[in-house]
Structure formats: structure tokens, C-alpha cells
Amino acid sequence: SDLGGTLICHKGLPLDKGFTYAMNEQAQAMATNVRIEDGSFFFDFTDGKVSIPNIRMGIAGLHNIENATAAIEAALHVEVDPNAIREALGSFKGIKRRFEYIIKTPQTVFIDDYAHHPEELRAAISSVKRLYPDKKLTVIFQPHLFTRTRDFADGFAEVLDMADETILLDIYPARELPIEGVNSEMILSRMKMLNKQKCGKQQCIDIVRIEKPELLLTVGAGDIDAMVQPLKNALENV
């Protein structure tokens, strides 16, 4: 920039200046050869000057690989050693509610994520399915905001159809007042899958206690996090 800094931006953004990054597509900084080995995501990094192969991510998720690509480039710009970068990414365990493992055993996997936009939700579901292709995926989703549900109902429905089973909760209103005709059924009615339902929180917990899903993903930016411990207890028969 004119102030001597560097703007690192995702490829495709309508910016005149900036150092671009992307995953599995051409950019100035790239994450390539993305793969899963022994339950972890690996990738190779290059920016035309520095290459860092075989980077293991301490956290899961394709979206986190994109984030890591930008972080690597920022670190290289301030002359951090590539080996230190690789070690840091391998040991970073993430933050709460960002692809957070609640249960991780050979029999049962329970992941909680803050995703509340269709593309965030797509990234979370895609990552889970890629990590556990042989497990049946049950998604519990709490829509966030009436306006977001109204504006992205089609997108949410399309993405939730990627799961094997979906349970929808009521919309978390946050700062908004209700909008007539806008509810979780807007999403449910647009979904093509048959294994779907909308229910209350306690009923949802009861369903999990009875069905014992082998792969459970809870997503949303509202108060769904308060259900994490009860759902964990339901899965573990506590």
C-alpha cells in the first residue's frame, strides 16, 4: 500500500491492489495438494518464492486451510522461518466453536461449529464429509436472524441437503423482531432430502439420545452452544 504495508486478499475480490491467495486455484499464494492422512488435513504451500510442503493442520476444515494460506503469507512477509510456520500450524488447536471436537472416538464423532451463512455451512459440512466419508452425517442447525433466513433460505436448503439427516431448530432472533412468514420451515420446505425435521431443543436432545448418531454436527451462531453439553451427555448416556 501507499503506507508501505501489504494487503493480502482472497483471489476474486474486486480490489485493485493486493497479494492474492487461494486454495487449489491459481493465485500468488496457493494451497495445493490438499489431502487427508491419518485423520488430519495436509497441504503444500507456495507463493512463487517460498515453498512449504507437507503442512499438517492442527485443526480440520477446508476453510481453515484457506485461512492458513493467508496467515502463512503474512508470516513470510515479516520473515518468520518456514519451519516455524509449519510447526505452529500443526500445533494450533483452534478456538471454541470453530470446528470444535466435542467427542472424537472410533464409534462417535461430535463437532460443533459457529457457521451461520450458507457458504460457511457448506465448508463445515464438506470438511466433515471428507474426513468421515463412511459415517452417516446428522446436522443440527439453528438459523440465525430472520433477515438472514429470509435472504438465504434457498442457499441453506441446498447446503443442508448435503447431510444424511437434518434437524432444524427455531430461528435465533438476536437483535431482530420477528418477520411475518419467516421461520425455519422456509428452509425445511425447500430441502429435497426426506430425512429432515424441525423440532424444539428438548425434543432434539431426546432424538439424539434415542438415535445415537455416529457423526453429529451442530451449527449456528445463536444459543445452540448451550445444547452442546446436553447433546454430549445424550450421546454418552450420562
Image (cartoon, helix red, strand yellow):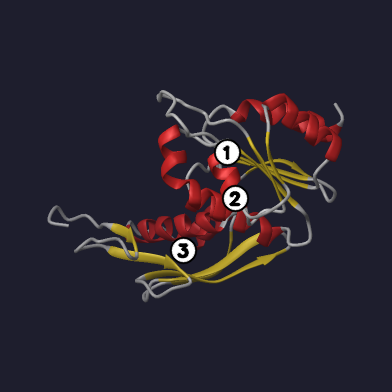
User: Is residue 93 something one can see in this rendering?
Assistant: no
Q: In which quadrant of the rendered image does the N terminus lie? A: bottom left
- Residue nearer the viewer, 101 or 222: 222
Q: Earlier in the sequence, mark 1 or mark 2?
A: 2
- Residue nearer the viewer, 112 or 143: 143
Q: Quadrant of residue 234?
A: top right
Residue that badge 2 annotates: 91
Residue that badge 3 annotates: 82
- Residue 192 against residue 233 in the figure, above or below: below
How dense is the environment of label 1, judged by Cα within 10 Å: few (below 14), some, or many (20 and up)?
Answer: some
Question: Residue at position x 48%, y 58% from top?
Answer: 85
Of the two numbered discs 3 and 2 in the rendering, the one whose residue sits closer to the viewer: 2
Mark number for residue 54?
none
Label 1 and label 2: CA atoms lie apart by: 41 Å
Amino acid type, mark 2 = Ser
Element under disc 3: helix
Q: Seen in the image, is 162 located left or right of residue 175?
A: right
Question: Residue at position x 32%, y 59% from top?
Answer: 9
Q: Seen in the image, is 65 located left or right of residue 164?
A: left
Mark number for residue 185?
1
Element under disc 2: helix
Question: Residue at position x 53%, y 48% from top?
Answer: 156
Amino acid type, mark 3 = Pro
x, y percent for residue 102: 70, 38
